[in-house]
Image (cartoon, rainbow, N blue to C red):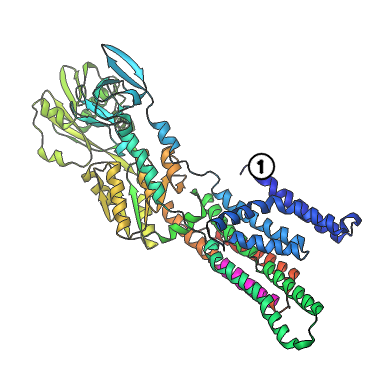
Amino acid sequence: MKIKEYIKPSFSLLMLVSGILMKAGSVEWFQNRYVALAWYIAAYLPVGLNVMKEAWVYIKQKDYFSEFTLMTIATLGAFAIGEYPEGVAVMLFYCIGEMFQDKAVDKARNNIKNLVAFRPDKASVIKNGNIITTDPANVNVGDVIEVKPGERIPLDGILLSEASTFNTAALTGESMPQLIEKDHEVLAGMISSDSVVHVSVSRPSSDSAISRILDMVQQATERKAPAELFIRKFARIYTPTVICLAVLTIIIPMVYFMITAGGDIQLYDIGHQLFKWINRALVFLVISCPCALVISIPLGYFGGIGAASSRGILFKGSNYLDAITNIDTVVFDKTGTLTKGIFSVQSIDALSRSTDDMLRYVAAIEANSNHPIAKAIIAYANSNRIDYKDVPVTNLKDISGYGMSADINGINILLGTLKLLAKEGISYPKDLIDTAETIVVCAIDGVYAGHILLADTIKDDAIEAIRLLNNRGINSTEILSGDKQALVDKVAKTLKVTKGYGDLLPEGKVAHIDQLKKDGLKVAFVGDGINDAPVLALSDIGIAMGAMGSDMAIETADIVIQNDRPSRVAEAISIGKRTKKIVHENITMAIGVKVLVMILGLLGIANLWEAVFADVGVALIAILNATRIFLNKNTQN
């Protein structure tokens, strides 16, 4: 929270406390009624003006009975009967409650900012043999653009170059680089991995893949209505009821007095009675002002947000603590959420040579590549102490989009995809086509020699995450991924997830979440990539992985898991339910005590001091009750 946000309430608090002390200490100059009035007006305005403005805004919208209206009437009533400190205290309590609420959401999400920054802002257009760098918005459909390795494609188009590998994670979330053939579509946001490519633009910048994701984020965010706090709903019933009772407090006794007084009634007596009951009504209004209720609700949520933060879970607002308690379906992205996004060798199948020999040859060749698969194989070889560094590799060739070719001691070795073997006319076991994992095949002197299987590593607590969700009554869990269906099915089976859906682009994920919501389910989506931003915004609760997740996902999400542990999702639900229970206890207590004191006030038994004492006492109990959320250390089981 910025320091300037403390200035107004701090000033009002200082003025209030000093005024009370000067009154109690019989400071001579402060005993003048007009001096005291001016003093407390100065204390009131910094915290009261905004509330009065809000009341006026709601009144113009024909919402006459908001909590802002109640605050305004009650505090002006306090000033009218000379109870200045109480009038200031009501607004100060309200301002403090709002500060607690604002603190939880002081870093409000900007759903668009990071995605706009992510979108490429330059395009290299080929015209008359020259390359012209320009804004993508200036590029026309049919223009040819050049994209170098490591650069992001600025516009959707058709690949004119030979087959090439692209990093598509920004759009599909697919963990492995994707081979795209000549004359096939490439999308804005993809990254060319291994060669310079030429692309014929097929859509203008405004219709590109990245722009469509941007639009989906905007639309999904607009479709998610913010949760309404209880105090606002309560005020629509409570405020008119209190005002009516205050009016009746004047009318009924006056009517009774007029009837029973008979013909001897004097104007003085009418004025005396009227002043008496107006004073009683104003005292009732001040008593009715729900200070303890106002402060107990945000304090309860603040306690929940604080407890969650200490466990590496960041709630971006108190409404999400409420909303997460209603979740009945949790949907996970796969790569980076349930898996580490780091590939490792799962198995090696060697035919004509030993496993160590084949791994030695493969590692020696892959040592010349920076591809993620190559790095995973090298890491595996090193961990198994395979000596590959002295193996003589000659005639090394990169077969773009297919793999590599090299000679070792006069032996020709091919490494790469199944398409490489098919291209070279080398037969291989057909059951390899249905393999879920990523596969690197090896051929020696034109004969299939074996293969290496690689897969993304499942996070250590992923299985535990699903178990904990089941324990909390969340029996519907799903995986949505851009990876191929066979791999998603395998991960879903390992984790005991209810359903898994693969081969999905962002549009497919959005459609799936939208359908779940139409079916009446309350959906939480857990993701980490830019491609997850639309579904994070559309779902009832969006949860992002904060350590490795993209800035866009973190900005769009309602909750951020700061340590990337999926098991924290179940813990977030537990903290939400515990917080909601404590808040409801505080609401019940605050309303119960308030109603009791109001009745005593109507009967003339309770005065303002007793009302203030009741409010302060209830607020203190509410504060202590809110801290109970921190006492439950074992929220993981």
Q: Residue 276 in magenta?
A: no
Give the quadrant of the C terminus: bottom left
Highlighted range, magenta: 585-601
Q: Look at 31% across and 32% down and name the residue there.
A: 376
183 vs 599, nearest the viewer: 599
| Residue bearing mark 1 | 4
Locate residue 139: give its quadrant. top left
- Residue 485 is situated, as x and y percent measured from the top left of the image, at 22, 45
- Residue 110 is situated, as x and y percent measured from the top left of the image, at 47, 41
The reply, left or right, for residue 319 in relation to residue 466 is right
**Residue closest to the far front:** 263
Q: Look at 53% across and 60% down and name the residue there.
A: 62
Locate residue 624: give its quadrant. bottom right
Question: Residue flagged by tag 1: what amino acid is it?
Answer: Lys
Depicted 476 relative to depicted 444: above or below: below
- Residue 184 is situated, as x and y percent measured from the top left of the image, at 19, 29
Residue 385 seen in this snapshot: no
**Residue closest to the far top:** 129
Locate residue 482: give its quadrant. top left
The reply, left or right, for residue 376 in relation to residue 544 is left
262 vs 334, nearest the viewer: 262
